Amino acid sequence: MLTPLRHLVRRNIERAGVGRQVDAAQLLALCQKHLGELVDPHVAGRTRAATFRNRLITLNVTSAIVAQELLPYLPDLTARMQREFPDLGIERIVTRVTTA
């Protein structure tokens, strides 16, 4: 009897206790994808969805100018992420200027 691999993987993730980390990784990957759809490619290329902690998604940006250019898009991006991951309680998205 064949068991779908998807169910086995999910069960093993839950058993290992890393479900929240997997959810966070999926959330950040989808956030990066939505960024590419919403903003200019120049801005998206200088932005990286970095962390999800305490109900906040942090976007690393290369400069304060990029952070400023993202501001008008953050409410829409937040709403998209809240719709995609309603169980995670996402409150908002913040930016952080990084040098690397």
Image: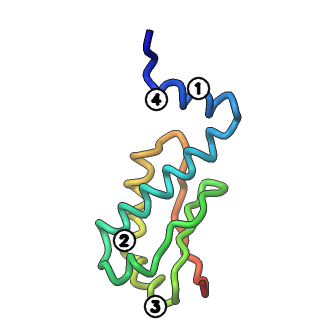
At label 2, the amino acid type is Tyr
Location of the N terminus (image quadrant) = top left
Q: CA distance from mark 4 to mark 1?
A: 9 Å
Name the amino acid type tagged 1: Arg
Amino acid type, label 4: Arg
Q: Position of residue 12 (x, y in %)?
A: 62, 29
| Tag 3 residue | 65
Q: Nearer the viewer, mark 2 or mark 4?
A: 4
Q: CA distance from mark 3 to mark 1?
A: 44 Å
Mark pair 2, 4: CA separation: 34 Å
Q: CA distance from mark 4 to mark 3?
A: 42 Å
Q: Which residue does the numbered mark 2 point to in the structure image?
A: 73
Q: What residue appears at the point 48 percent right and 82 percent down from the top-left corner?
A: 67
Residue at x-position 53% and y-position 71%: 59
Q: CA distance from mark 2 to mark 3?
A: 14 Å
Element at label 4: helix
Q: Secondary structure at mark 1?
A: helix
How dense is the environment of label 4, judged by Cα within 10 Å: few (below 14), some, or many (20 and up)?
Answer: few
Q: Position of residue 94 (x, y in %)?
A: 55, 70
Name above or below for residue 62 compared with residue 85: below
Which residue is the site of mark 4?
6
